[in-house]
Every structure is written in C-alpha cells, then in structure tokens.
Image: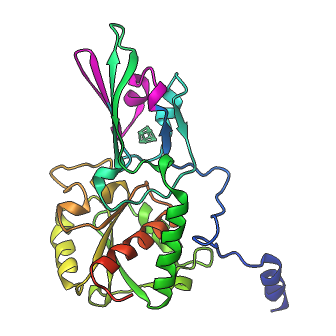
Amino acid sequence: MFKILKKTFDTGLVTTGYPDAPPRLSENFRGAPRFDFDNWRDARPAAEACPTQALSIRDRGAVREVTMDYGLCIFCGECCAADRTGAVLMTREFELAVRDKADLVITAQYDIGADGVQQHLKQIHCGLQPVERDTAALEKHVHQAIHQTLGRSLAIREVDAGSCNGCEVEITALNNPVYDLERLGIHFVASPRHADMLLVTGPVTRNMELALIKTYRACPEPKVVVAVGACGIGGGIFGRNYATLGGADQAVPVDVFIPGCPPRPHALLHGILLALGRMGEKGLPL
Ligand code: SF4
C-alpha cells in the first residue's frame, strides 16, 4: 500500500495541460511534412516515393502541377527522404483539423524545362496550410471552446466504420490519465441517442455504410460529425473501391476533418474543440 502511494507521489501529475499549455511531445514524434514550394526545383522523387499519392504531380506540356493533400498524408516521411533538393521537411505540426476538406489541399504550378526540372513557380493555391496558421487566433479559439465546454458536458459516440484500429488506440488514449478528456467535460457514450458528436474512423466499408447512416440518424439534432484520420477523410490507403466508400463524407455530412494516420490524441482533442465551434453555429446550447 505504502509502495503504491510512494510511487504515486514520485510520479507526480502526468496529465497534459493541452490546450492551455503546449503539449509534451516525444523526441521521435513526427508530424506533417512542410514544403518549400517557392524554391522547390524537382518534386518528382518525392512524389514517386509517396505511398498514398498525397503528394502527386501532373505534367502538361511545359507546366507541372504539384498537389499536396494533407487529408491523404500518413506522415510517413518518405517524401522527405526521397527529396534531393532540401525542399521537404518533416515537422512536429499536428494541429491540422479543418472544417472544409478542400482546405487540406495545396496546389502549385511550375514552368518546367526540357529536363523536367521546375524553373519557376507560376501560382500556388493554399488551403489552410499548417505552417501558415495564425497560432494566436487558434489559441484564442481553443480557450473559448474550453470555457464553453466547461459549462456543459459533451457526449461523443465513436463509430468504427472499418478502421484498422490505429485510430481507436489513439481515441482510447484520450481517456487515460495523460490526456484525461473528462477533465474538459467531454465523455464517450455507448448510444448515439445520448450523443452530441459522432467520431467516425475508417474508410467506411460498404458493410458499415448502413450502420453509419443509422447511427447518424439516431443521434439527436443538432449534431456534429468528425471524420478521423486519413481513412475517415478520404479512404486513406484503401481509397474508394468495391469494399470501401472512401471516407465518412460519402455516407453522412461531416463537419470537421482530422488528418493523421492515426492522429495523435492531441490532434484529436484539437479537432474535437474545433467541432465545438461548429456546434455553436448549429444552435447547440453550450
Ligand atoms: S509524409 Fe508520406 S504520405 Fe505524406 S506526402 Fe510525404 S510521402 Fe506522402
């Protein structure tokens, strides 16, 4: 008994202070890749190495279009390893959740020479590029969301729509003493009839399509749906095929998308807080 008490006191407080305080990330944590589109001279090796086609190129005559879709990215780092120009860097960025899937896509157009080398950046269209986020505004939003949440509990029903369970491992971690989601008044419930929010993982297998739709219908209005991970956003490495729909938004309306494979618990928390703002817009009294 005394040994247990001693160990408890020796360990101290392990619960993260996020979002009020910056998260403690492990040394080996790898976040989203960052691209120096202005000075990138050859995107071909990186695009060829990308296993999910999150990074892709399309050459049309003397013009190359480079597309980066953070919704498909699994943060594997292969693009960074393959790139020989120093234009790709793996960061520790994880606050990537967005309300519009299109915000996860960056498209850059280049003039290319006869040797296929990019010579000039013609134009670039950025969604909500993580490296350009207004961190002060984000912090303010998170604080507001937390204070609103503390005034009322939030009930989440998780729906596994064909996931490999990688996302479930991270979602389960939200309930452990380190992340302790309940400290924010947020808890998971067993029935969609008691839920304010659906957290959907997996590429939505065709076997799970009807179950997801029925769960969505069973959830009382107003409700929000959060698509979790590369699979939940766009089918991930499975994509859309005979067995999968290719993302939660193919079956039900989605309010927030959380990239990652799987998203770490801090990223899930960030996305859930973003969804809280959406809830306020939908008229849920917070
Ligand atoms: S980190 Fe991996 S999945 Fe993401 S763009 Fe690079 S190679 Fe593709």
Residue 109 falls in image quadrant:
top left
Query: What residue span does the magenta drawing correspond to?
Result: 37-65
Q: Quadrant of the C terminus?
A: bottom left
**Above or below — where is 68 with respect to 138?**
above
Residue 124 picture location, percent across and down:
35, 34
Residue at 81 percent of width and 83 percent of height: 9
For the question of whether residue 142 can be seen, the reply is yes
Residue 141 located left or right of residue 111: right
Residue at 17 percent of width and 65 percent of height: 251
Residue at 43 percent of width and 21 percent of height: 42
Q: How many marks overall?
A: 0
Residue 100 picture location, percent across and down:
29, 58
Residue 119 located left or right of residue 224: right
**View quadrant of ligand 1:** top left
**Above or below — where is 81 with respect to 7?**
above
Residue 194 picture location, percent across and down:
31, 90
Residue at 22 percent of width and 62 percent of height: 249
Residue 150 picture location, percent across and down:
50, 87
- Which of the two residues, 22 or 3, is positioned nearer the viewer here? 22
Check the image and tell me how it is coloured: rainbow
Residue 11 falls in image quadrant:
bottom right
Residue 273 located left or right of residue 24: left
In magenta stretch: residue 46? yes
